[in-house]
Image (cartoon, helix red, strand yellow):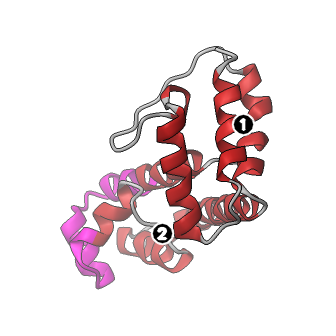
Amino acid sequence: MPTSSSIREARRGLGAQLRALRLQHGLTARELARRCGWHESKCSRIENGHAAASPKDITAWARACGDEGAAEELVLTARGIDAMYVEWRLMEKAGLRHAQESVLPLWEKTRVFKAYAQNLIPGPLQTRAYTTAVLTGIRERRGLADDVQAAVSTRMNKQKWR
């Protein structure tokens, strides 16, 4: 089951591929944006994984680079990322506890854990109070069932394995 961080990473990967395509054809982001009729910031958001690239965006990008043949594979990648996002949302609808439990098999196999989070303490380092606040915020923003305490207990039990 994909996590929201793996979805962000997949978007960054697609953005890197699009950046490489742009650079391969000697275009600046400004020139690419001009050719596509976009604001330059759209290129930056896509390349850095902060915005999803639609199939239409990818096709325009490849056309602007003069490499329309590159679009097909990149569009397939984008559709795969969209499917990951939908899967994550569906998993959350079953409850935050379910979302926490779904990653347990992967967690049990994990021997080395690396994390970088600019705005959030990584899950394995969170206290009960911090995890409660984070999951409560997610529940409220997404209108999910209130199973926060069960989800917190699952996450806290997961941390005991380390």
In percent of the image, x 50 and y 58: which residue is there?
Answer: 137
Tell me which amino acid carries mark 2. Ala
Q: CA distance from mark 1 to mark 2?
A: 35 Å
User: In this rendering, is residue 40 above or below 48?
Assistant: below
Q: What range of the chain is rendered magenta?
A: 17-41
Earlier sequence position, callout 1 versus callout 2: 2
Answer with left or right where residue 78 lies relative to residue 115. Answer: right
Can you give x and y, in whole percent of width and height, for residue 145 in the image?
Answer: 71, 65
Q: Verify whether residue 28 appears in magenta.
A: yes
Can you give x and y, in whole percent of width and height, for residue 106 in the image?
Answer: 74, 30
Image quadrant of residue 34?
bottom left
Comparing 86 with 97, the one in front is 97
Crowd class of label 2 (few under 14; some 14 to 19; many from 20; radius 10 Å): many
The residue that disc 2 covers is 53
Can you give x and y, in whole percent of width and height, for residue 45 in the image?
Answer: 33, 63
Q: Which mark is residue 109?
A: none
Quadrant of the frame with the C terminus: top right
In percent of the image, x 58 and y 45: which residue is there?
Answer: 6
Q: Verify whether residue 94 appears in magenta.
A: no
Tell me which amino acid carries mark 1. Thr
Answer with left or right where residue 92 lies relative to residue 127. Answer: right
Judge depth for marks 1 and 2 and give the one in front. Answer: 1
Answer with left or right where residue 96 lies relative to residue 46. Answer: right
Q: Which mark is residue 154?
A: 1
Determine the main secondary structure of the stretch shown in magenta. helix
Comparing 96 with 17, the one in front is 96
User: In this rendering, is residue 112 above or below 24?
Assistant: above
Answer with left or right where residue 124 lies relative to residue 157. Answer: left
